Amino acid sequence: MATRTQAEVTELQESALEHLWVYLREPSDMAEKGEPQIFVEGKGCKVTDALGNTYIDGMSGLWLKNVGYGRTEIADAAYAQMLKLTYMPMGTTSEPTIKLAEKVASITPGDLTRCFFTSGGSEANETAMKLSRAYFKRTGEPTRTKFISRKGSYHGATFGTLALGGSQYFPKEDYEPLLAGVFHAPQPLPYHCEYGGTTPEECAELCIKAIEDIILFQGPSTIAAVVAEPISSPMGAAVPGPNYWPLLRELCDRYGCLLIADEVITGFGRTGKMFACEHWNVTPDIMTVAKGITSGYIPMGGAITRKIISDAFVGSSKAAFRHVITFGGHPVASAAALRNIQILEDEHMADNAAVMGDRLLEGLNDLKDKHKIIGDVRGLGLLCGVELVKDRATKEHFPAEADLGARLTQGFADNGILLRGGDAMNVAPPLCVTPGEIDEILSVMDRVIGQAAHELGAE
Ligand SMILES: Cc1ncc(COP(=O)(O)O)c(C=O)c1O
């Protein structure tokens, strides 16, 4: 059912084109395409735009609609809290915020027990970076100030986190100079192992060795932390070899630096376990979260620290962690997060992500057998990646003139699926996805990728 007439939609679009930055979009491009598209409603995995077109959201918004759209229980919890208390006096906290911190401590691995809440993922990573440096200042190693992250990763939009990132899709040149003292190791993506590893395990070992080389070259006593997503998304679900995370943990322990796991995308059930680090039995020193903590019903994030880290900030007013984010731990966001986590648990959504993820990965592998422009398929749970290539032998991507990304995105949308096309695509529907919806996504991908291959003469 259309909720707006075409004339009303056009008026809203013109206003948006005049007054709004739509992220990752440029106004004249949107104007030419009759965009921005305006969404008004969602239920489960489906979203409906203002003209009444309904789609399966194959990307969960931005990897965040974990419990799906339209869960009135979360709205009710937020509303009930809003009627009671919407902020607290300075230097105090609220009941739902305490309960959420306790809940997060109980579901995160190992002794990750204290949470600093933020409004989103960039702030969570920024908090983790500041915590790392401050921790070493408190514990007598003030020269530990540098960070190591990986090429191809994304950790946020602020100056510090942008410096950590290494993705071509989020170029830095407009904003330089960024934070100094950040060094980039290779991404442990077996399909493109920078160091020539021929198996996921060998690639992992070589990529860990590259981090060790940076540590040794810079001097171990200068490194504060290694920051990494368990599975990085900009390159399309870069699932590392199973030895990567245990080796990374061991490496950080050996050289005394902290390990920060950015679980902003992977946390809260996405990969088939509550947190991706659990796949490898690794406890990071700091874990950052956002997105799925509220399934995007309201902004929230957090940096959770192991007891040994948090204890360095306890004991005197001088020891305190001097850092404030006004909306971190907002009572309404906390109430929504608590209800969201309850739904994830009660409805076994991480288990569903594991089962549906297997179905999706198997289907994507079938598509790879059928379409030779699919060079690689990878994933864990409902975090899957598909890489498209012009030539399987060289792994060369299509040239920009082929306009593969836009061609695919439009083709998927015309067939009722929201997915962003490109050389490396992500497929990450909400964790409540059904077998029928997975099959629908696969069947549309089959048709649209087949059509694109035909048009590009690459069948
Ligand atoms: C892995 C990862 N870390 C951090 C962020 C930044 O989160 P936010 O956009 O909420 O600041 C993102 C955002 O997509 C992300 O994917």
Image (tube, grey):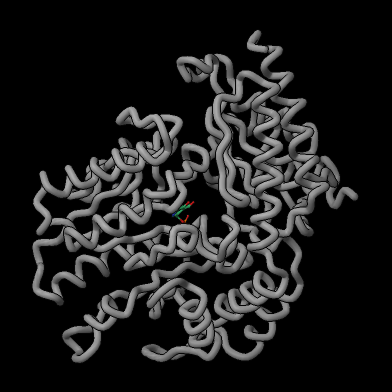
Q: Is residue 403 above or below residue 18?
A: above
> For the point 65% across and 52% down, which residue is it?
60
- On the image, the x and y values in percent for residue 190 come to 43, 35
Considering depth in this image, is 22 or 6 the residue closer to the camera? 22
Considering depth in this image, is 256 or 182 the residue closer to the camera? 256
Q: Is residue 224 above or below residue 153?
A: below
Considering depth in this image, is 168 or 217 the residue closer to the camera? 217
- On the image, the x and y values in percent for residue 135 come to 20, 72
Q: Is residue 15 above or below residue 411?
A: below
- On the image, the x and y values in percent for residue 304 come to 39, 72
Task: Please tell me in which quadrant of the rendered image residue 422 appears.
Answer: top right
> For the point 16% across and 70% down, which residue is it?
136
Looking at the rendering, in which quadrant would you find the C terminus? top right
Please state if 360 lies on the left or on the right of 229 as rendered.
Answer: right
Report the number of numbered marks: 0
Q: Is residue 139 above or below residue 438?
A: below
Task: Please tell me in which quadrant of the rendered image residue 270 appears.
Answer: bottom right
> For the point 58% across and 52% down, which residue is it?
63
Residue positioned most to the top: 457
Considering depth in this image, is 43 or 37 the residue closer to the camera? 43
Q: Is residue 330 visible?
A: no
Q: Is residue 2 visible?
A: yes
Please state if 46 lies on the left or on the right of 109 as rendered.
Answer: right
> For the point 51% across and 55% down, which residue is it?
265
- On the image, the x and y values in percent for residue 124 come to 40, 64
Task: Please tell me in which quadrant of the rendered image residue 32 appears.
Answer: top right
